[in-house]
């Protein structure tokens, strides 16, 4: 009969391990909601999509040089508008007026959370929905959704050279022409847009000083970001950006940082993966190619629980639009958020006379 103290310690160890094995997974994940995890199946599915997108981009580059100027002689570069939403796209009438008359110069793609019940979609967005997966605050699912939008846009149309991420609570602050010319330059330079792609700047906020940076860095555990992301390289920035195509491709090719940023947070209160992943990756890969500021205006005064100020109907006026456009950078703001859904009425009243006059 085994009766040595070793046996008892061994038996205790086995039963404790067994207990942990059986119950551990049910105890541990309570720190974060179950859906915040990215499943292996979803991750592999995305990987295949991103690979398809990067492959199609390199083959269209190769064929465009072969066909030389022929196929692209009448082509104009386009802006891909990527709408990330989990509710109705209530500002569709404003966006519809924004896009009106510029059909050859843009494409629209929508990623809508499949669990959100969207009511009748405005015709602007019909057939523009891409295969979507669940999204949730304080989880890396918002990074995946943004990458999925970029991949679909790249696969859909090789003329998409800029990728503007917006949400359902964003509105335009300028005309489409203004935005287009600011990104691509005047009409003569538009013809050169394909050959000068390597000089296209991305407009993404990249900040290295933030009072909560250390806490945000450690949201998944103190040392888990190492060695891929040392603290000195960790950046923060606005969730909404406009990326040049080469940067969108760079984001789709990344596996190294994603491995870390896809980990679920242990500290939900410092968990904003989408505000960290893109600024950190782009600042590591091509800091000079990025503006370091965003073109989407947000009002963080008196923010509550990570939500910015939401403008209501009483605040909408021509003066507000003019104020929101003002920036300290070379460009005036293109878009603004957030607005309550009922702002659509007063916004439509001033759309042609104020918003789209510039
Ligand atoms: C990627 O392309 C392959 C081959 O065309 C296709 O079978 C696969 O479904 C694509 N993956 C995704 C996620 O679209
Ligand atoms: C920002 O929001 C605050 C309220 O939170 C408001 O008082 C202020 O006027 C807003 N600023 C702008 C520029 O709209």
Image (cartoon, helix red, strand yellow):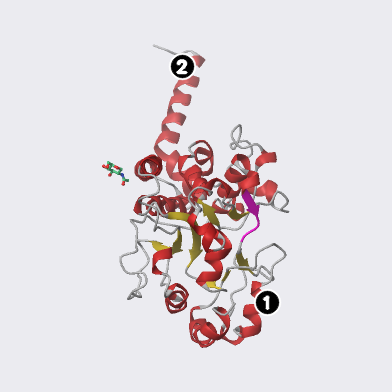
At 39% from the left edge and 65% from the top edge, which residue is drawn?
104
Residue 245, position in %: x, y? 49, 49
At 47% from the left edge and 45% from the top edge, which residue is drawn?
249
Who comes first in sequence, dot 2 or dot 1? 2
Question: Within 8 Å of ligand 2, the CB of disc 1?
Answer: yes
At 37% from the left edge and 66% from the top edge, which residue is drawn?
116
Asked whether 64 or 333 is in front, the reply is 64
Residue 96, position in %: x, y? 42, 75
Residue 210, position in %: x, y? 71, 53
The prevailing secondary structure element of the residues shown in magenta is strand
Question: Where is the C terminus found, in terms of image quarters?
Answer: bottom right
Question: Where is the N terminus found, in terms of image quarters?
Answer: top left
Q: Is residue 288 above or below residue 77?
A: above
Q: Give the mark count.
A: 2
Whether residue 291 appears in magenta in the rendering, the answer is yes
> Label 1 belongs to which residue?
323
Q: Quadrant of ligand 1?
A: top left
Q: Is residue 154 above or below residue 335?
A: above
Q: Secondary structure at mark 1?
A: helix
User: Which residue range is magenta in the image?
Assistant: 290-294
Q: Residues within 10 Å of mark 1 (few under 14, many from 20)?
A: few
Asked whether 13 or 312 is in front, the reply is 312
Q: Secondary structure at mark 2?
A: helix
User: Mark on residue 19?
Assistant: none
Query: Which label sits in the foreground, 2 or 1?
Result: 1
User: Mark on residue 7?
Assistant: 2
């Amino acid at each position: 009969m085994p009766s040595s103290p070793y046996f008892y310690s061994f038996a205790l160890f086995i039963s404790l391990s067994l207990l942990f094995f059986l119950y551990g997974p049910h105890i541990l994940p309570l720190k974060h909601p179950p859906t915040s995890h990215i499943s292996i199946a979803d991750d592999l599915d995305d990987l295949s999509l991103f690979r398809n997108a990067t492959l199609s981009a390199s083959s269209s580059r190769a064929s465009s040089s072969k066909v030389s100027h022929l196929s692209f002689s009448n082509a104009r570069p386009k802006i891909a508008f990527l709408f990330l939403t989990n509710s109705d796209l209530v500002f569709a009438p404003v966006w519809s007026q924004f896009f009106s008359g510029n059909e050859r110069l843009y494409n629209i793609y929508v990623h809508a959370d499949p669990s959100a019940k969207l009511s009748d979609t405005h015709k602007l967005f019909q057939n523009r929905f891409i295969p979507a997966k669940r999204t949730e605050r304080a989880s890396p699912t918002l990074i995946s959704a943004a990458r999925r939008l970029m991949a679909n846009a790249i696969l859909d149309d090789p003329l998409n050279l800029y990728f503007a991420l917006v949400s359902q609570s964003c509105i335009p602050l300028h005309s489409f022409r203004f935005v287009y010319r600011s990104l691509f330059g005047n009409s003569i330079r538009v013809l050169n847009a394909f050959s000068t792609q390597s000089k296209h700047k991305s407009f993404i906020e990249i900040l290295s000083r933030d009072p909560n940076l250390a806490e945000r860095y450690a949201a998944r555990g103190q040392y888990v970001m190492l060695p891929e992301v040392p603290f000195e390289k960790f950046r923060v920035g606005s969730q909404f950006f406009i990326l040049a195509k080469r940067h969108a491709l760079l984001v789709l090719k990344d596996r190294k940082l994603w491995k870390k940023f896809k980990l679920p947070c242990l500290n939900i209160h410092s968990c904003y993966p989408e505000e960290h992943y893109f600024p950190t990756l782009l600042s590591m890969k091509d800091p000079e190619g990025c503006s370091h500021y965003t073109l989407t205006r947000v009002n963080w005064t008196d923010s509550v629980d990570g939500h910015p100020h939401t403008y209501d109907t009483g605040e909408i006026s021509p003066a507000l639009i003019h104020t929101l456009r003002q920036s300290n950078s070379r460009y005036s703001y293109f878009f603004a958020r957030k607005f309550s859904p009922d702002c659509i009425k007063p916004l439509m009243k001033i759309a042609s006379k104020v918003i789209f006059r510039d």
